[in-house]
Amino acid sequence: MDNKKKIIIISICVVIALIIIGVAIYFTVKNVSTSSDEKKLAKVYEKMMENETYSFSLTLDDNNKTVISRKGNMANIDIYSDGNHTTNLIKDGNTILLMYNTQKYYTYQNNEIQLTELSNELDRIIQSGEPQKGEEEIDGRNYKYEEYQGVSYFLLNSDTTVSRESTTTRFYFKGNDLKYIKTIMGEESELVKVDVSYNVKDDIFEIPENFQEG
C-alpha cells in the first residue's frame, strides 16, 4: 500500500472517530440538560400516583400537623390544629368526620371531594409552568428548591388569611425526596417539614371502636 492510500485511510478513520466522539458528547450533554430540567416535584407526584398509595405528612410544630394518606379509593386526612385532633375518612364514596375530643363520628353521604384534593393540587402546580430553581440552607443543611407562584394549599396556620395569588411556595429537596415546603406571603413565611412515604396500613381507614355515631 503506497503512502497516499495510507494517508487517505488514516484521514477517514480520524473523521469517523471525530464523528463518534461528537455524537457521544451531544447525547451526554443532552441527557445532563434533560436531567437538570426535570421537575423534582413532578417525580414525587408520579411516584405517589403509581399505585395511588401514599402518606403525605406536613408538620409545622408539635400542635399543628396534617397527614394525608390514600390507598386507592380510600383516604385518611388526620389533622392536628392547636392541639385539636380531627380526622376525615373517605371510603365507599362518603366522608366520615371523627371528632377525638368527643369520640363521635359524623357521616356525610356521597362526598369524597378530599380523596383527590392533594393530588389535584400537586398536578395543578406542576402544570402551572416552569419553576424558579435555587438553593437555600435550612437547619445547617443546603437544599435545592423549586419555587411556584400562587400556591397557598400547604399553609397549616389557621390564623393566616391570604389570597393564593399573593403567595410564593418553595418545595425543598434532598436528592429527589421532598423535605420541606415554605409558603411566602410578603415579608412573612411558614415552613413545614414534609415526609412522604408509599406504605399505608389498611386499619387507618376504619372507625375506632370507642367512637359513637353523632
Image (cartoon, rainbow, N blue to C red):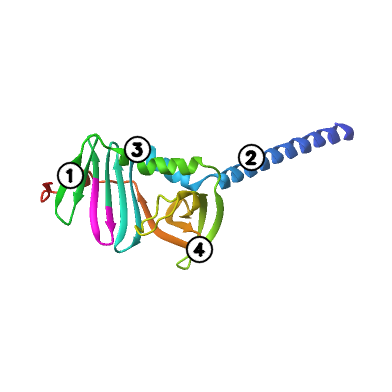
Q: Earlier in the sequence, mark 3 or mark 4?
A: 3
Observer able to see residue 126: yes
> Amino acid type of disc 2?
Phe
What whole-number distance in Å separates the C-alpha atoms at marks 4 and 1? 40 Å
The residue wearing badge 4 is 187
Does the magenta segment cover residue 46?
A: no
Magenta residues (range): 79-88
Question: In the depicted view, which residue is nearer to us: 1 or 163?
Answer: 163
The residue wearing badge 3 is 51
The residue wearing badge 1 is 106
Q: Earlier in the sequence, mark 3 or mark 2?
A: 2
- Frontmost of labels 4 and 2 is 4
| Residue 213, horizontal then vertical, whole percent | 12, 45
> Amino acid type of disc 1?
Tyr
> Amino acid type of disc 4?
Glu
For the point 85% across and 36% down, the residue is 7
